[in-house]
Image: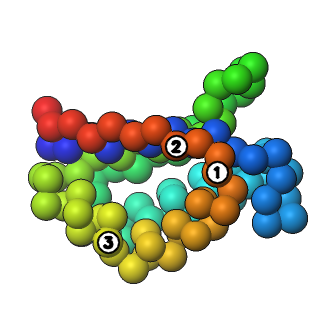
Amino acid sequence: MIKHIVMWKLKDEAHGNDKATNAKLIKEKLEALSGKIDGLLKIEVGIDFLGGGNFDVALYSELSKKEDLEIYQNHPLHQAVLPFIREAVIDRKAVDFEV
């Protein structure tokens, strides 16, 4: 099993929205991928509630195998979400590991 974890720090404003609105939209867009991409077993998106310099949004996902991570990353539905996220983000950290 592959675990794919990403964290984003958001701009104060992007897409004509404030940070909180964009965090909610990112959560909705990513969670809408659930059940639509082969090999993507689980996807969760959390919005930080503490603030104070933390990252704003975190993605936790599980995939069947390494090849499924590539399929997920290149899938048209995932690719369609990326421009929105990229425009709203000032920093990104990610880790992928196998268990």
| Crowd rating for badge 3 (residues with CA inside 10 Å; few <14, some 14–19, many 20+) | few
Instruction: Give the structural element (helix, strand or loop) at label 1.
Output: strand
Q: Quadrant of residue 1?
A: top left
Query: Which amino acid type is shown beneath numbered disc 3?
Result: Asn
Q: Tell me the residue at 44%/73% (across/down).
A: 79
From the viewer's side, name the closer residue of 85 and 61: 85
* Residue 76, x across and y down, in percent: 39, 79
Which residue is nearer to you in this view: 57 or 8?
8
Mark 2 neighbour class, 10 Å CA radius: few under 14, some 14 to 19, many 20 or more = some
- 11 above or below 75? above
- The residue depicted at 61 percent of the width and 32 percent of the height is 55
* Pointers 3 and 2 in contact (C-beta within 8 Å): no
Identify the image quadrant of the C terminus: top left
Q: Which residue is mark 2?
A: 92
Ranked by sequence position, the earlier of labels 1 and 3 is 3
Measure the C-alpha gap from mark 1 to mark 2: 7 Å
What's the distance in space between the residues labelled 3 and 2, CA to CA?
Answer: 18 Å
Residue 24, can we see it?
no
Disc ID at residue 74: 3
